Amino acid sequence: MTRTKLFRVAGVAAVAAGLVFVLLQFIHPDETIANVTTTTWKVVHVMTLVMAVLAVVGIVGMYLRQVEETGALGFVAVMLYGCGFFLIFGFSFVEAAVLPQLASTDPDYVHDVVALTAGADVTGDIGGLAVANVGSAVTYLIGGVLFGVALWRAQVLWRWASALLALGALSTILIQILPKSLDRIVAIPVGVAWAALGISLWQSISVHRDSVDGARVEP
């Protein structure tokens, strides 16, 4: 696969990840044991798995498109942000495939995992999921802010979208003070930023090819 095709695939992946991320905020069921065994719960978390993979592809593509311009900050940012989505993938896999199977045999465990994702008190032992949950939140926030800043400084992709990504990631700290009914709103700017950056990535490849082709034309 050529670099141009790679970047275009990454651009499409970023757009798709952004759109799915926004959609998930509107269809995600409440974190309750009763919902764990529903079809909606399974579909939403499978969609989250797909979104996480698409996001990683998009993020890596954006970074490789401007690896020199983003420098060390870009490397650190893409590593943190990428790790965040690997953790999200793992946690979502447990929610999609494991919790529905345990809902009837180990409801206490399921209740604690669901409580963890809902920001409620956890009374039992849920093993490494507690660490994974904290890790995904921290890397999502810090990685998103740093990646947005790195893209903004590189001035290759749309700077407004880069700034929106950084601000959107930073706004996740508002979840601690927002009413439960509004805590998913803060994710929407990030999804919009991904989609916009994906479009910008695709456009930047077209512009770059046009400039190269123009340079090859002899006067």
Image (tube, rainbow, N blue to C red):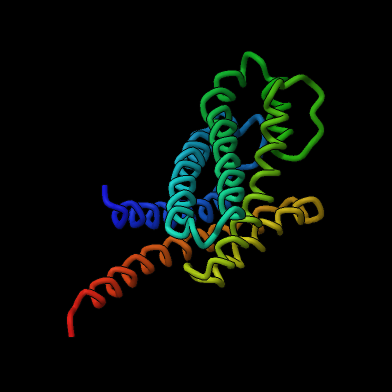
- Residue furthest to the top: 105
* Rendered position, 119 above or below 27: above
Front in this rendered view, residue 142 or 23: 142
Residue 156 point in image, percent of width and height? 47, 68
Residue 161: quadrant of the picture: bottom right
Camera-nearest residue between 158 and 23 = 158
Return the residue nearer the eye: 204 or 58: 204
Count of all numbered marks drawn on residues in the image: 0
Kindly identify the residue that appears in the image at 59 percent across and 32 percent down.
Answer: 91
Residue occupying the far front of the picture? 219
Q: Residue at x 58, y 39 (%)?
A: 83
Residue 79's place in the image compared with 96, above or below, is below
Image quarter in which the C terminus is found: bottom left
**Position of residue 66 measured from the top left corner of the image (x, y, whole percent):** 46, 60
Question: In the image, is 165 to the left or to the right of 58?
Answer: right
Image location (x, y in percent) of residue 167: 67, 63
**Which residue shows up at 76% across the image and 19% down it?**
125
Q: Looking at the picture, does residue 20 appear above or below residue 165?
A: above
166 on left or right of 161: right
Residue nearer the viewer, 72 or 158: 72
Residue placed furthest toward the left: 218
Does residue 24 appear left or right of residue 181 in this picture?
left
The image quadrant of residue 207 is bottom left
Residue 109 x/y as whole percent: 70, 20
Residue in view at x 61 percent, y 44 percent: 80
